[in-house]
């Protein structure tokens, strides 16, 4: 099939071998007399795909896909799905796809041909629907299926096919078939569901769409969508079926998608144990609770499916969301048949009815999020104390949370002052602090709180962190008190001992780390994790150069573009140019982790240093290729493995600056990207605005 071929009005001839195979299968399987509706579509080799696209596949990076993904004829680099989203295989036509992708151009060409065959089969089914099967709707001829209950059959829309205003129900047996011929687009409204009843199965539902299909936010679709153009799954939508787009792209911003019959997780929630809750249709009542006290409910999650249940995360919103809090979170993953629990506490601060909504995100595409309405009532206020701990003043800490002292040079110390406030109506007494844990000896209470503390009163205590060796340190602090809801108040204390060799001297220029730190994300183009960190010169003099140390990284994480490391192995990136007062530089840091697991947020330390100097003692080498790729500027040159090279850049071919760091060639070809700092002073606006050369070093 040519790359620009579009579905035709009738199905093309199939190869003889495939016809013979289909005939043999038909002879081997008894005809199901009880099946209603048209014969099902034969999806051929497209059946194992959840997403098959003729153009780019885009995603916000969330949601789970249970099944395979592929795109053709577009390059693999246009597949935006990341490997962590997949419970299946990504197929690409070339090596530019995601790191876990399999190159299978022949397989994809066959699948696109089979998509044409299946699409034309669906579009050409007869007899042509008439009467209530033509532009069906509660309002005859409207083409809006919202609120309808449809029997198996062949349905045709001559304009836009709508499912809005209310859910649509498809009622039939496990072998019954529905085919919807949509001459134009298919639109599923926000929050709308395709509901199956009587044993109907998603594998027997087919939506042939002449233009594009759109699934609204939080909608649930069942069946295979065969679209001539694009398919869009909006935020939190789910699909039990397939998104097969012939000529345009697929947008997957949903919570999940799964091919019918594939292994998939399932979620069941109980409270109390043994009482199943219904998603979106249950109210969990905490009853009447005295103001100033609290009560808790424990919910049990069971995985009723055949694949791991993942992505469990709880949010609470609504009018009184601050009164309902999750005190124990569920496990990150639950195996088939396994269980986990989470606990919600209700703590009213005033009399009257209270309500909030709990949302449980998960990888069950039919029940994500799982929604539960929470209610309770506050009764007459009592006389009770209330403990609130802040650090710094104004920033409330959470019981069971943590506090980080940051990086501290070995042999020195730093202290934090914590403020205790009595938010209750009775005196806060019995204040006592203990510290335990693996590094408890490094954290010391140097000033204890005063007691008692009257209603609305405050007191403070001070904790000192004094590391004696490099590396991360941790301990747990406990504040004993007479607040029944917070006794003890527990905090995990953390800090990092750092090599004195990377401590910024206090009598010279000092650089402070600003708040400009981005999340760590995976770049599918390079296979590296990336993060930007902005450093601002808050001093009064110009720094000659800037060195940014990256602390607290897991042992299996490498800083791919590191300029070097300290004596204790702490990696750094370096900006080898002056930085004037009140100016900032943004570093792009590249991390490599072989297993592609999420990298925890590191800590940073900034130091003034000396610029990189490179002496041209070797030949100036040619740059073989200089090209812009997706906003990145690629430099490529020949090299001798193990030899050292310096990339230099210029805007006028007269004044040359040296990029950091110097390169040790890993092979006979080196690819180097100019992303701006820390390698170069800035990212070039266009490839023609900067010239490059390579120096061979001793």
Image (cartoon, grey):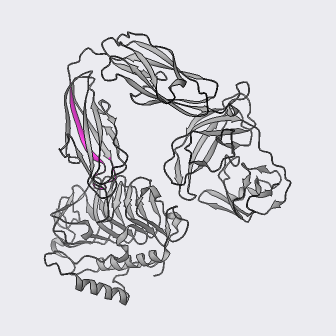
Closer-to-camera residue (465/579): 465
Does 373 appear in magenta? Answer: yes
Q: Where residue 327 appears, x then y in whole percent?
A: 33, 33
Compared to 691, does 208 lie above or below? below
Q: Residue at x 23, y 83 (%)?
A: 28
Q: Is residue 433 magenta?
A: no
- Residue 123: quadrant of the picture: bottom left
**Position of 268 relative to 97 (above/below):** above
Q: Position of residue 630 (x, y in %)?
A: 59, 59
Image position of 152 with respect to 503: above or below: below
The residue depicted at 25 percent of the width and 80 percent of the height is 125
Tell me: 340 left or right of 520: left
Magenta part of the protein: which range? 361-381
**Left or right: residue 584 compared with residue 286:** right
Residue placed furthest toward the right: 617
Extreme residue toward the left, this view: 34
User: Horizontal and vertical percent for residue 100?
Assistant: 49, 62
Q: Quadrant of the N terminus?
A: bottom left
Q: Is residue 582 above or below residue 31?
A: above
Does 358 sit left or right of 451 as displayed? left
Kindly tell me whether residue 634 is visible in this rendering: yes
Specify whether residue 319 is in view.
no
Image quarter where the C terminus lies is bottom right
Q: How many numbered marks are there?
A: 0
Query: Residue 308 at x, y = what percent?
Result: 34, 54
200, 473: nearer the viewer: 473
Image quadrant in which you'd find residue 63: bottom left
């Amino acid at each position: 099939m040519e790359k620009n071929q579009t579905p035709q009005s009738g199905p093309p001839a199939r190869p003889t071998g495939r016809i013979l195979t289909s005939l043999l299968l038909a002879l081997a399987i008894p005809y199901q007399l009880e099946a209603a509706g048209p014969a099902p579509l034969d999806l051929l080799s497209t059946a194992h795909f959840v997403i098959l696209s003729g153009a780019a596949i885009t995603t916000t990076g969330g949601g789970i896909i249970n099944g395979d993904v592929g795109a053709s004829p577009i390059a693999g680099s246009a597949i935006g799905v990341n490997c962590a989203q997949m419970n299946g295989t990504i197929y690409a036509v070339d090596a530019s796809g995601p790191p876990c992708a399999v190159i299978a151009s022949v397989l994809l060409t066959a699948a696109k041909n089979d998509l044409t065959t299946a699409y034309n089969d669906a579009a050409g089914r007869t007899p042509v629907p008439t009467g209530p099967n033509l532009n069906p709707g509660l309002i005859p001829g409207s083409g809006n299926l919202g609120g309808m209950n449809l029997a198996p059959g062949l349905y045709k829309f001559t304009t836009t096919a709508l499912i809005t205003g209310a859910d649509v129900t498809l009622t039939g047996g496990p072998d019954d078939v529905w085919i919807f011929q949509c001459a134009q687009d298919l639109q599923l409204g926000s929050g709308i569901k395709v509901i199956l009843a009587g044993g109907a199965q998603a594998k027997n539902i087919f939506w042939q769409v002449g233009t594009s299909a759109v699934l609204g936010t939080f909608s649930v679709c069942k069946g295979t969508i065969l679209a001539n153009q694009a398919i869009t799954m909006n935020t939190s939508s789910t699909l039990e079926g397939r998104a097969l787009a012939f000529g345009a792209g697929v947008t997957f911003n949903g919570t999940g998608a799964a091919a019918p019959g594939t292994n998939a997780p399932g979620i069941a929630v109980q409270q109390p144990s043994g009482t199943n809750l219904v998603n979106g249709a249950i109210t969990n009542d905490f009853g009447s609770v005295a103001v100033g006290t609290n009560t808790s409910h424990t919910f049990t999650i069971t995985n009723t499916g055949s694949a791991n249940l993942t992505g469990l995360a709880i949010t609470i919103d609504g009018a009184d969301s601050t009164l309902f809090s999750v005190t124990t979170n569920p496990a990150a993953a639950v195996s088939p048949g396994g269980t986990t629990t989470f606990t919600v506490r209700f703590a009213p601060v005033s009399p009257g009815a209270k309500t909030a909504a709990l949302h449980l995100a998960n990888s069950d595409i039919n029940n994500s999020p799982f929604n539960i309405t929470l209610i309770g009532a506050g009764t007459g206020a009592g006389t009770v104390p209330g403990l609130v701990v802040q650090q710094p003043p104004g920033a409330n800490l959470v019981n069971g949370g943590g506090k980080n002292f940051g990086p501290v040079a070995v042999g020195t110390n730093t202290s934090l002052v914590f403020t205790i406030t009595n938010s209750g109506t009775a005196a806060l007494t019995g204040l006592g602090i203990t510290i335990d844990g693996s590094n408890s000896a490094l954290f010391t209470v140097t000033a204890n709180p005063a007691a008692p503390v009257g209603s609305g009163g405050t007191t403070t205590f001070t904790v000192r962190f004094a590391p004696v060796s490099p590396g991360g340190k941790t301990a747990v602090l406990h504040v004993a008190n007479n607040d029944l809801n917070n006794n003890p108040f527990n905090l995990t204390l953390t800090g990092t001992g750092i090599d004195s060799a990377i401590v910024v001297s206090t009598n010279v220029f000092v650089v402070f780390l600003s708040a400009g730190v981005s999340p760590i994300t995976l770049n599918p183009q390079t296979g590296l994790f990336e993060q930007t960190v902005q450093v601002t010169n808050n001093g009064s003099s110009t720094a000659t150069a800037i060195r940014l140390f990256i602390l607290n990284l897991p042992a299996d994480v490498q800083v791919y573009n590191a300029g070097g490391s300290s004596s204790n192995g702490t990696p750094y990136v370096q900006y080898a140019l002056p930085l004037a007062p009140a100016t900032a530089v943004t570093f792009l840091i590249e991390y490599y982790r072989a297993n592609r697991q999420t990298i925890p947020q590191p800590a940073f330390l900034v130091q003034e240093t000396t610029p990189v100097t490179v002496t041209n003692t070797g030949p100036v080498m040619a740059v073989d290729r200089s090209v812009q790729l997706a906003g990145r500027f690629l430099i490529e040159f020949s090299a001798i493995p193990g030899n050292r090279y310096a990339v230099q850049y210029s805007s006028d071919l007269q004044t040359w600056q040296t990029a950091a760091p110097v390169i040790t060639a890993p092979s006979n070809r080196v690819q180097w990207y100019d992303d701006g700092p820390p390698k170069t002073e800035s990212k070039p606006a266009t490839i023609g605005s900067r010239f490059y050369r390579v120096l061979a070093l001793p």
